[in-house]
Amino acid sequence: MTVNLASKIQKFQFKNLFLNASGVHCQSKEELDDLRHDQFSGGLVTKSATPNSRFGNPLPRYHSLPAGSINSMGLPNEGFEFYLDYVTHAKMQKPMILSVAGMSKDEDLDLLHQIQNSDYQGLTELNLSCPNVIGKPQMAYDFAGSDQMLKEIFAFFKKPLGIKLPPYFDLVHFDRIAEILNQYPLSHVNTINSIGNGMWVDIESEMTVLKPKGGFGGVGGSIALPTALANVRALRQRLNSSIDIIGTGGVTSGRDAFAHILCGANMVSIGTQLYEEGLGSFRRINKELSEIMERKGYHSLDDFRGKLKIM
Ligand code: OXC
């Protein structure tokens, strides 16, 4: 039996459901080219672009944990023009998502104006949830502010636009954010960004493992899987069916990807595991997911997407 891992966001067809998580292996031209040519990833997401190139936070700013990672990169990137040019002109092997993150609401609006006025016709994703920029709160935790911002954005932005969300932890917050997002013609939400402002301590040196922000950083990898699954599930239950979901967080195997799809994910992205294992993770996780589907007699993702059973 052959299984089909094809999926889509709106009209954009991906030959399989796997993406890199924004931030991992997607900053330089070489990294983006690697992803574009990799036959086991379905699409790619760029590093979140800020108006100008940035070095990001001081090093060390990434640390592997026993079951995941903690980072405080601080949006190092080549600047908006570089990424807009890449996604507009690179010979397409697969659909690409342009991720953007201004340092303020005005910068977000300005970046989106530039995309609206450009030749780019693909998917854009506004990152409202980076936990690591000093002095910049995670916008998507400000419900009224996010609502107002989306209102201003959709007054002029007519291209496909999704947003990257932080994890929510209270059912009331799922209700609130979904109620806001459902008012707007979003192409998708990408959930979750790393779990913000965690801490890891090296007891020998009695020091934090990260330098920026006094050692606080975003937690990802296996540790984040239960939170990611809950966010995918809770949002799928609440969002309009017209809004697709990219499940991000804690995917290290085909089993984890299968769980994300059962919770309702249309696409699945791989962050910490891609960083730790490299591009080969796409091939392995593809194979593992296909084997699970074969064993269960599923031909396509639609056979089980969102069909999580409750005990
Ligand atoms: N989430 C982001 O949105 N950005 C990066 N890290 C993270 O966990 C970063 O650049 O800090």
Image (cartoon, grey):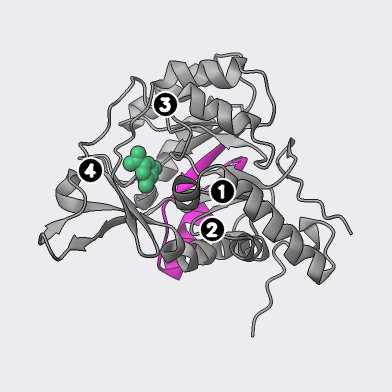
Q: Which residue is mark 1?
A: 269
Whether label 3 touches label 4, CB < 8 Å? no
Binning the other alpha carbons within 10 Å of mark 1 as few (below 14), some (14 to 19) or many (20 upward) gives many
Report whether residue 123 is seen: no
Mark 1 or mark 4: whose residue is earlier in sequence: 4
Secondary structure at numbered mark 3: helix
Name the spot of residue 218 as percent of width and height, x first: 33, 52
Name the spot of residue 74 as percent of width and height, x first: 29, 38
Specify the segment rendered in magenta. 160-189
Whether label 4 touches label 2, CB < 8 Å? no
Mark 1 or mark 3: whose residue is earlier in sequence: 3
* Amino acid type of the residue that numbered disc 3 sits on in the rendered structure: Leu
* Amino acid type of the residue that numbered disc 4 sits on in the rendered structure: Pro
Q: Nearer the viewer, residue 249 or 51?
A: 249
Secondary structure at numbered mark 2: loop
Q: Which residue is mark 4?
A: 60
Q: Spatial distance from mark 3 to mark 4, Cα to Cα?
A: 32 Å
Whether label 1 touches label 2, CB < 8 Å? yes
Q: Spatial distance from mark 1 to mark 4, Cα to Cα?
A: 25 Å
Q: Is mark 3 within 8 Å of ligand 1?
A: no
Q: Is residue 77 magenta?
A: no
* Amino acid type of the residue that numbered disc 1 sits on in the rendered structure: Ser
Q: Quadrant of ligand 1?
A: top left
Horizontally, residue 92 falls left or right of residue 4, namely: left
72 over 288 or under it: above or below = above
Q: Which residue is mark 3?
A: 109
Mark 2 or mark 3: whose residue is earlier in sequence: 3
Q: Residue furthest right?
A: 1
